[in-house]
Image: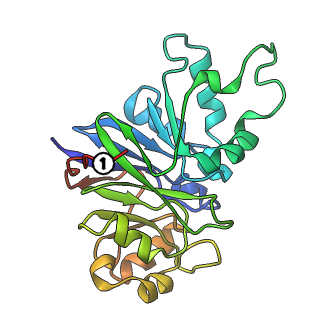
Amino acid sequence: MNWSLHFLGVGAAHAVELGASAAVLERDGEPVLLIDCGPDTLDRYLAAYGALPRALFITHTHMDHVAGMERLFIRLWFDERLRGKTRVFLHARLLPWLQARVADYPGVLAEGGVNYWEAFQLVPCTRGFWLDGLWFDVFATRHHVPGTSYGIALPGSFAYTGDTRPIPEVLEQHAGGGELVAHDCGLTGNPSHTGIDDVEREYPPALRERLLLYHYGSAADGAALRGRGYRIAAAGERVALPAPSVPRADAG
């Protein structure tokens, strides 16, 4: 069985030419889980797979990570075969923020009579969640206000930080076994995002060797990061992953 992480987009919010940052976990080339759904994510997903996602994880509720959910709602609601079938996983603390961002506007449809979440299967979680017999860890990251952003890890295989400042102690816990670490990183950091100087200051060499950087500001920034010896994700790229570990008996 082959596992891969397919990067649909890799850009920071302003880097529209790189696509909104989103990735798909694949098993034998088939999509298992979409991570984030920005403005152009659904188009990229449909181009790659020819179908709507059946499972989605939201890292946080900035619009470059959730703006595509409106179009996804429309596609799901008007297809009775798909309505209510796509599972949306998110940390329970994000639910009020996601509700305010995408679901609370009066009149989901002009005709009325529709509740936004009826188009989906909403699955709030805290420590993690089960999907297709796999246990995914969910962990807090450092992006703006505490408790508003979360990463995801499939033990033995990969961790995906979402937007974050450096989190060495968290990655030691959730990606300390040799997993690939897809990490937010620009050429220059700021109070909400990691820069390459932050990586070199905060992370030990053994972890830096496992980093795959995304959410950078431009193609030129990506080239500069690569020039400093780091592996950079590109839009459309599929990255091979180690096979996930057998879930622990106490997972979940």
Callout 1 environment at 10 Å: few (<14), some (14 to 19), or many (20+)?
few
Going by the image, does 90 lie left or right of 33?
Answer: right
Q: Position of residue 228 (x, y in %)?
A: 38, 84
Nearer the observer, 30 or 155: 155
* Residue tagged 1: 250
Observer able to see residue 174: yes
Which image quarter holds the C terminus?
top left
Residue in the image at 61% along x and 39% along y: 68
Instruction: Kindly give the residue lying farthest to the bottom in the view shown.
Output: 201
Q: Position of residue 73 (x, y in %)?
A: 62, 27
Q: Quadrant of residue 193?
A: bottom right
Total marks shown come to: 1
Residue type, mark 1 in image: Asp
Q: Position of residue 137 (x, y in %)?
A: 39, 53
Instruction: Kindly give the residue lying farthest to the top in the view shown.
Output: 80
Instruction: Kindly give the residue lying farthest to the right in the view shown.
Output: 106
Q: Quadrant of residue 158?
A: bottom left
Q: Quadrant of residue 145?
A: bottom right
Residue in the image at 63% along x and 78% along y: 190
**What's the image's color scheme?**
rainbow
Going by the image, does 89 lie left or right of 27?
Answer: right
